[in-house]
Image (tube, rainbow, N blue to C red):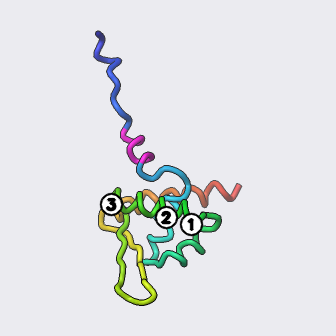
Amino acid sequence: MDNKYIYQPCPVSKTLQLVNGKWKILILYRLSFQDIRYNELKRQVYGITNTVLTRALTELQQDGFIQREEFDETPPRVIYSITAYGKTFLPILHEIKKWSETYMKD
């Protein structure tokens, strides 16, 4: 067997797997500016449903991008924020934003 045909995963595919779809990128973008409560995040990520937002937040939390802090209050208060690991992705996210602004002008 010729070794040049052995499958080697593309490093970009892992990143795309972690932040797949438009919603996770938008959630991370909003969280890059401030820690935020669920309902405010839902208002800022226009068009997302509760189900999709909850799933995306859970996956981002499981993958270490964000953290969820729950306060023992009535009514319950939950704040989402970016972790140190998640902050390592922010330069990439802001470069995507700059690229988009450049090409949206046309």
Mark 1 — residue?
50
| Kind of residue indicated by mark 2 | Thr
What is the quadrant of the C terminus in the image? bottom right
Give the magenta-colored segment's residue range: 11-17
Q: Position of residue 52 (x, y in %)?
A: 54, 60
Q: Looking at the picture, which amino acid does disc 1 mark?
A: Asn
Q: Is residue 98 visible?
A: no
Image vertical order of residue 13 relative to residue 49, above or below? above
Q: Which mark is residue 28?
A: none
Q: Which residue is mark 2?
A: 54
Q: Earlier in the sequence, mark 3 or mark 2?
A: 2
Query: Which residue in the structure is indicated by mark 3?
Result: 64
- Is the residue 19 above or below the residue 34 in the image? above
Density class for disc 2 (Cα within 10 Å; few <14, some 14-19, many ≥20) is some
Res. 7 image quadrant: top left
Labels 2 and 1 touching (C-beta < 8 A): yes
Secondary element at image label 2: helix
